[in-house]
Amino acid sequence: MISQAQFEKEIELIISNAIREDVGEGDHSSLACIPKAAHGKAKLLVKDNGIIAGVEFAKQVFEYVDKDLKVEILIKDGSLVKKKDIVFYVEGSSQSILKTERLVLNAMQRMSAIATKTQEFVTKLEGTKTKILDTRKTTPGIRALEKWAVKIGGGENHRFGLFDMIMLKDNHIDFAGGITPAIDKTKQYLKENNLDLKIIVEARNLTEIKEILKAEGIYRILIDNFSFEETKVAVQLINNKCLTESSGGITIDTLRQYAECGVDFISSGALTHSIYNMDLSLKAV
């Protein structure tokens, strides 16, 4: 996993790039009709039900654009919200508030939708040992925001990218000439480059699981696209020699059944790639 410092740097890059993209040489709409000295106040209004996420991100956006903007937070990240709730007030330069509006809304609407969906998955898993994981199936350029939202919703983050964990999937295995060659080459690579990275190996059937178990130092086995019965057998076969993760076509309706097979984790791309933004608006007071 990436460090807190790396994560914070990602957030800074997202904000700076988003402002560059949206504002460019200037917010001419505001510059044209709002006096520079104009003072204003706005509220973040909820127009939907769910889990709010992105409040702390919004604070960082306001500070980046104008350090003199004052934010009064009424509802914190991770809280359940309903229509007509007011999450926060922001007060200061009217031009600055307008400059931040679209970035704050775009981010919070998406983050809140992800947190809400994640919370649904987490609730389904209550009473089991299984934790829900996100994936790399994220929107290019804002992965840090989407993974942050998963955490706010009560889920866990998988690897951040290709650099912070080894994950040998089907194509790696096939290109490398099989499971054993892929694992052996990986261990040699890590040794030669003095890298300390966890290794996850994907299994497509029980035969592959048996082969993976012959290798030492495997952190987790990804049990991919197995049926419930096959997953139960796989968990028994692995027998806590390493952690287990189920993935592949698992929905909110089948989630609980896979958890009851005894896996440690379930990963779902649906947390980030199949969501509908929560309806929020930033309104002048």
Image: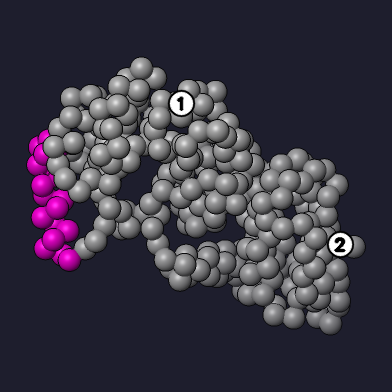
Q: Nearer the viewer, mark 2 or mark 1?
A: 1
Q: Residue at x 30, y 37 (%)?
A: 240
| Left or right for 55, reference 251 | right
Q: Quadrant of the N terminus?
A: bottom left
Q: Residue at x 46, y 36 (%)?
A: 130
- Residue closer to the observer: 114 or 261: 261
- Position of residue 15 relative to residue 148, above or below, is below
Q: Residue at x 11, y 49 (%)?
A: 185
Residue 181 shows in the view: yes
Residue position marked by numbered label 2 in the rendering = 284
Image location of residue 15, percent across then percent down: 57, 67
- Give the Cα distance between marks 2 and 1: 49 Å
Q: Residue at x 75, y 40 (%)?
A: 49
Q: Is residue 19 magenta?
A: no
The image quadrant of residue 249 is top left
Q: Amino acid type of disc 2?
A: Ala
Q: Amino acid type of disc 1?
A: Glu
| Left or right for 273, reference 96 | left
Disc 1: CA contacts within 10 A as few (<14), some (14-19) or many (>=20): some
Q: Earlier in the sequence, mark 2 or mark 1?
A: 1
Image location of residue 251, percent across then percent down: 50, 27
| Left or right for 235, reference 127 | left
- Residue closer to the observer: 235 or 99: 235
Range of magenta residues: 176-194
Residue position marked by numbered label 1 in the rendering = 260
Q: Main secondary structure of the magenta part?
A: helix
Classify mark 2: helix, strand or loop.
strand
The image quadrant of residue 92 is bottom right
The image quadrant of residue 284 is bottom right
| Left or right for 65, reference 35 | left
Residue 94 shows in the view: no
